[in-house]
Image (cartoon, rainbow, N blue to C red):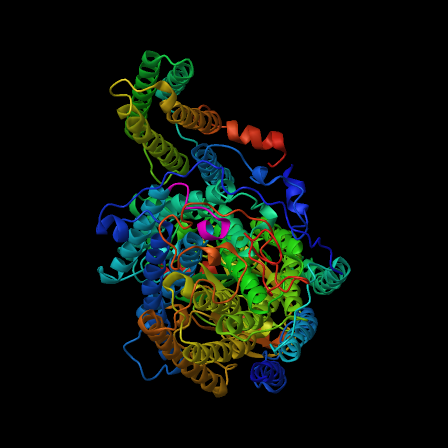
Amino acid sequence: MAAAIILVLVVVGSVAFHVLSPWWWTELASNWSYIDDTLIVTFWITGVVFVAVILFMAWCVFRFRHKEGRQALYEPENKKLEWWLTGLTALGVAAMLAPGLVVWHQFVTVPEDATEVEIVGQQWQWSYRLPGADGKLGTSDTRKVSYDNPLGLEPGDEAGRDDVVIEGGELHLPIGKPVKVLLRSVDVLHDFYVPEFRAKMDMVPGMVTYFWITPTRTGTFDVLCAELCGVGHAYMRGTVVVEEEVAYQAWLEQQQTFEQMTASAD
Amino acid sequence: MGLFQQLTEKPWLPSPLPLADARAIRLPAARLGLRVFCGVVTVLFFLLLVAYAERMAFEEWRPSAQPWLMWLNTALLLTASAGMQWAVTGVREERIEAVRTGLAGGGLFAVAFLAGQLVAWRQLALMTPFDITNASIAFFYLITALHGLHLLGGLVALGWTATRLQGDPPPAGLRLNVELCAVYWHFLLVVWLVLFGLLFSGNDNLEILLALCGVR
Amino acid sequence: MVERSLGPADIVPPFEVEDVELYHPKSWLTKYVFSQDAKIIAIQYSLTALAIGLVALVLSWLVRLQLGFPDYFTFIDATLYYQFITMHGMIMVIYLLTALFLGGFGNYLIPLMIGARDMVFPYVNMLSYWIYLLAVLVLAASFFTPGGPTGAGWTLYPPQAILAGTPGQESGIVLMLVSLILFIIGFTMGGLNYVVTVLQARARGMTLMRMPLTIWGIFTATVMALLAFPALFVGAVMMLFDKTLGTSFFMPAIVQGGEVMAYGGGSPILFQHLFWFFGHPEVYIVALPAFGIVSDLISTHARRNIFGYRMMVWAIVFIGALSFVVWAHHMYVSGMNPSFGFFFAVTTLIIAVPTAIKVYNWVLTLWRGDIHLTTPMLFALGFIVTFVSGGLTGLFLGNAVVDVPLSDTMFVVAHFHMVMGVAPILVIFGAIYHWYPKMTGRMLGETMGKVHFWTTFLGTYAIFFPMHYLGLLGVPRRYHELGVTSFIPDSAHTLNAFISIAAFIVGAAQILFLFNLVWSWFRGRPAGGNPWRATTLEWQTPETPPAHGNWGKELPVVYRWAYDYSVPGAKLDFVPQNQPTLSGG
């Protein structure tokens, strides 16, 4: 009896916690509302199943608790019931999977008009590189990293000369324009994580990975590292500023290009 | 009764099976144990092969030189297996002398193979330029070492079987031991032939195989 | 609908199979220390696993101290924190859960439940334990080496795991890898035994489908472990080479502290593939024995046959097979080829179907049962709640795109603790309460057991259920302090403190359990041979605790499946598997 009541209370408590919880996701600042929608669908389906299964269990515990003279039903299996349950479960799973796959397709398909931005992780700071006037990022090689060339750009590559290099500063992005974020690391794994953007991807040394977003809300957002990268992991912070095009251009003007950087070093 | 039938029977009904037959597999336990073990080892080397292939597709793959000695070593291992087979024939025909010769041959040639592998290690290490960060070289050492360790384990089992040859034991009592040793020898030979053929006999055999399978 | 014949089964003359040659211990040392008896080995495995598990429990307290009250315990810095979480995770997953389910319960229950005298290779079985002990000692030694144990996270991802900037990179990581390699060698010896014993040494009449689900779970998990551990073995050996010999299997060109390192060309993702090719089956290596055991607990204590036995067996086998093609769902945001995401999301969500069937069948076994709310039964019910909760959140993380915002947050931590931490641990407790009478001849204290259950169950639920919401908020995992952020409100810190307090209460309850284990050994109520009135063979041994060889002169003969509870027409509400007729006799 008590056990059944506590089981019911667990269900009621869980649902109440979910509804009343002040801890909920941050306000979205990118185009990935589909991700949030898929999450909501998943919450509903799994929530219903959770409540149904545990309440049924609580009822069984109450209704069929041991009493003198009670005999359990001998029933090895019930094919019909089992197939029904299997079918319903498959249906529920499909209802979560289908939107998930559609949105995943969008997630991995970068729009053609996306501009490229490179983010480089190193222990324990973020650096950024934006294409210069030619709209192209130059090639890079980790082995070329040095004090004067923190991101390891190929000095010989024409395309890289006008690239804007920002070491340890903040990144600005224009609102409403799709960005393909190219991710690189020069030492260990990192993960560029802005909760408001929803999208994230690991940075892997020796590879270039990517994700894409369209910022939809101006503001200043915290950047955290989401992949364990050593003792400084929790301190690897940064800032992303999403702003209107005009402000963005004004900011861009002030940044140093790779060519200027190497020139000033000489 | 097939496995499928066994797994679909309704166990709450009286068994259709005479009780005496209620066993899935009729093999001496040691034989089955060895088979399972060989399965595990196969997975191990298969994963190494997959890792090799994946690493090969990553940047900066530099094929390494192959010591010519490996061909000779392969022949030694082949002979060792033949020796073990000789012992098996001997034990089946109850000729204890053949068992002795076969086991001695199998053991000695296996030791010779291991020694040859060590020399090949040395040969590769003396080649210039030698660069341990080159994955093809590192894989060579890793894979030959793991294969060698498995053979070494086999030699321990062989040694134990050999001690039982002292005196004049009836060959029938030895039959299972000798056969199991031989199975293990043949297994390690096959593993070696696959590894050698794909990885160490020519630099692009694995590449060719992957291309044939349409993976790459 | 009841389909069964009520007539007596054919009575066969007992035992015509050749006698198994048993090793007879000659001294105290070979009887209790270097023992070849699976039951002693099982107890050795269990005690070792519990001992190292206690270390992991203490580590989790230290972790929670820091997370709940980041300003008070300044001695826990980032270095120590990462060492604590790494060792906690690794110990719990490998050295406690895997060892306890397979080495502990596997060794104890397999021979008894299938009606064998012992494992088929007792000597190898003994070696298995001693190598496991060595692995545990090597692991424990890393606490005392310069630089301390590794703090690379239990996933040990390279390049970080072996580079400066990670705690324990001096020697801790080497000991960790060596310990894992030893563990795998030891486990392979034990695993061969379990598989061959189940296939070869079953008593007469014990067809595959008459085996209790406990055996099915342990058997399938062992087969999986034999196939999955080689991947960890390969990964560990390769990383050991990278660390000690300077090879570059997983190490690309790296610049650290302004210096270009000698490494070059390696693939960090390759390690992740190897790790998770082991790591995901590992989840089920822990879960399947728990599934099996909980099925038997529910059936016995609800006095009802397990509902849909055949479906349960097929589901175990299907889950086991499928778990080998889902590993990359741990890697949606790892930078691997994104098109893999489609395949792995599909396989991962498919696995939810057989898993759900198992849950339905457990609950349907309760339905129209005769439920005795004994301590083992309570733990089984607690398992269903936490497993359903943790399993359903798995559907979030398995669905590639939903995983993107949640990966590497506390949501993941909450999910896997619920599903493969709390749920299997509850089963372990339930199983100990259930089989302790067989192992010692005495019952565990029931009142203490109930207090232990409710504190542990409600406490762990209070720890991990709210934790999901921290993850949803965006709190990342593996942060020893959250620092100042714009999106984490103060209330999240309060919640963290609450979670920590719940964790300490749960931890304290385990002391009661340990006390109960010791107290009942001397003072527990004598149990008799079959206190739960269960059908399976281990309860039908001539002696309790079972003697060496288990069965006295004659091996049992099996006439029925393991679930003949409340059979219409039977005299009692259970019919033991070795009883030829319903009425007994």
Q: Does residue A170 lie above or below C165 as drawn?
A: below
Quadrant location of the N terminus of chain C? bottom right
Image coordinates for residue C459, horizontal then vertical, percent = 47, 79
- Could one spot residue A253 in this view of the protein? no
Residue at the (48%, 80%) spot, across then down: C454
Q: Which residues are magenta?
A: C111-121
Of the pair C573 and C73, the residue shown nearer to us: C573
Q: Does residue B92 lie above or below B66 as drawn?
A: above
Residue at the (64%, 66%) spot, across then down: C365
Image coordinates for residue C525, horizontal then vertical, percent = 39, 73
Q: Please identify the quarter of the rendering in which residue A146 is found.
A: bottom left
Q: Is residue C115 magenta?
A: yes
Q: Is residue A98 magenta?
A: no
- Could one spot residue C33 in this view of the protein? yes
Of the pair C386 and B139, the residue shown nearer to us: C386
Of the pair A249 and C115, the residue shown nearer to us: C115
Quadrant location of the C terminus of chain C? bottom right
Image coordinates for residue C133, horizontal then vertical, percent = 30, 53
Residue at the (53%, 49%) spot, across then down: C220
